[in-house]
Each structure stands twice: as C-alpha cells, then as structure tokens.
Image: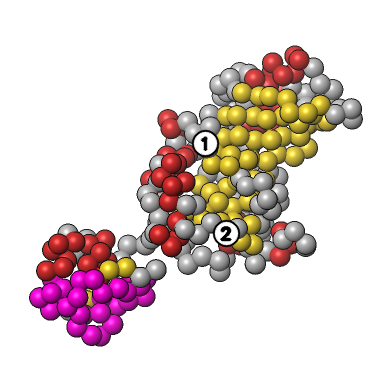
Amino acid sequence: MEERLQNILAKAGVASRRGAAALIESGRVIVNGRLCREPGARFDPESARVLVDGRRIAVPERKRTIMLYKPAGVLSTMSDPFGGETVADIMRGQVAERLVPVGRLDKDSEGLLLMSNDGDLTLRLTHPRFEHVKTYVVRVAGRWSAEKLATLRGPVEMPDGYVTRPAEVAVLKEREDNVTILEFRLREGRKRQIRYMCSAARLVVLSLKRIAIGRLSLPRDMRPGQWRDLSSEEQEELGGAPQGAAHGARRETRYAVNNPTNRPDGQCEEQ
C-alpha cells in the first residue's frame, strides 16, 4: 500500500512528520533515483528506495497478524527436524512478512491459531498475567457422570506437579454411544492441559478444537488450512499494534495453496 512520503520518513524515525516535510521541501530526499520535494507524494514503503542526505533509510516491517485454522496433524512451529509438516509450510509463499505462531496447539489439535510479527501482541497473548480466555470444543469418549464433570472443573494435578486452576467446563451434547461434547474455557494454557484433565476424569479425547481467543472467534465457515488477516479493530482489541489499512481491510478467507490436502476438496498453549 502506498503512503505519503513524509509518513514514510516519520515511521523510519528520521524526523517527526512536520520535520520530514521540511526535509523533503528543502531538497534533501531522493526517491527511486529522483529528487522529490512534495511531502504528500505517495510511494510503496516496501519497494521504494528512499535516501535522505544520500543515506538510504530502513523502513520498519509492517505489523501483521493473521488467524489460521490449523489442521490436525500439523505442528505449530516454524520447523521440525524430523520432517513433520508445520504451519510455516502451510503459509510459505502466502505472505511477504515472516509470521510466527502466537502460542501453540499440539499436533493432534486443530482450530484457531494466530501468526504474527507483532512482539507486543505475542507477549499479551502468551504471558499468563494477561489471562486471555481461550475456548475449546472437545469430543470425549467414556461413560459420563456428574462426578466426571466436577473432576474436569478442577483443580487437577498435572504430571509435572502443577495444579491447574478451576476451569469453566460445560456439556454441549451427550450421545448414546458414550461420546460427550464439552466446551472448555481456560485462563491458562499448560502443555496438553485439557488432555490431562480428561485423563484424570477417565475420559479419552477424540478431537480437540480451539474456537476462540478472548472475543476473537474462528469463523464457522472457515475450513482447515484457511487463513485471513485480522482487521485493525480485532488486533487492537487483542492488544496489538494497528495494522496497515490494506491489511486491516482484508477480511476474505484464503486457502493455503501450498497445502492442497487441507482444502475442502482434497509459555505453552498446547492443548
């Protein structure tokens, strides 16, 4: 997206917008090999070659955050030494920025995963003190009882000795085949926490899907492997920096084309 030249200089830390305008008007700025004296001239900051007093300026990388429907069987890491498929493989070639997972979902889990280059947002969503509620829908197998629901609501002692905080757990559906669909709302995210909680209640997890982080929900029509940019409003609500207008306005859902098997036809938060 093109921006006013004086804003490009201001974002690069050269001067304030007023100071940048003065630099431009005094003939000290060259863009793409040509002298520019118009502060309002528009250029793409990612491709324009901008020199001030003969020195090229470095434009900070634009903040960007996307929501990805992570498929089951995919690792929420940037690489795997054992050759497993990762979210980086899904997104390769789809975005220009280097986006990394914000928190994790384990390999067997699916659902809402954010990827971002916004360090402040990543900290707010992964540090325990911010307590963003994360919501999961979980299918479990085993004979159901009210006592098991009480166990799930905790506290539950994890294998490493950590004792979980009480959780909000609701029954969405009980089936006659001893399969129950549950909703978990957690304010913490220990590795494989929900699976250990279910094990303590003598239940077997059949599927686990994260459907929301705070008030940000996975769209009902989004399919595994699809992604879209967060709007500026969504990112600000989560506590991150506003995105560029072009990214903020982009709300259509996309397929990760490098992962055709995920199309309809074809601190830890690991749960």
Q: Amino acid at mark 2?
A: Glu
Q: Is residue 61 left or right of residue 268?
A: left
- Residues 217 and 137: in front is 217
The residue identified by callout 2 is 252
Q: Earlier in the sequence, mark 2 or mark 1?
A: 1
At 53% from the left edge and 29% from the top edge, which residue is drawn? 187
Q: Residues within 10 Å of mark 2 (few under 14, many from 20)?
A: few
Check disc 1 and report the residue beneath it: 214
Vertical relation: 135 (above or below) 45 = above
Structural distance between the alpha carbons of marks 2 and 1: 21 Å
- Please check the rendered image and state whether residue 114 is part of the magenta-colored stretch, yes or no: no
Q: Secondary structure at mark 1?
A: loop
Image-based side of 182 in relation to 27, left or right: right
Q: Main secondary structure of the magenta part?
A: loop
Tell me the quarter of the image containing the N terminus: bottom left
Q: Is residue 218 left or right of residue 208?
A: left
Q: Residue furthest left?
A: 26
Asked if residue 27 lies in the magenta stretch, the reply is: yes
Question: Nearest the camera: 222 or 206?
Answer: 222
* Rendering coords of residue 192 (x, y %): 64, 35
Left or right? Give the position of 263 relative to 168: right
Amino acid beneath label 1: Gly
Circle 2/circle 1 CB separation < 8 Å = no
Of the 4 image quadrants, the one containing the C terminus is top right
Q: Which residues are magenta?
A: 23-50
Numbered mark located on residue 88 in the image:
none
Q: Is residue 130 visible?
A: yes
Instruction: Report helix, strand or loop for mark 2.
Output: loop
Q: Residue at (61%, 34%) from the top-left corner? A: 135
Residue 196 in view (yes/no): no
- Residue sitting at x 84%, y 22%: 143
Location of residue 149 by image quarter: top right
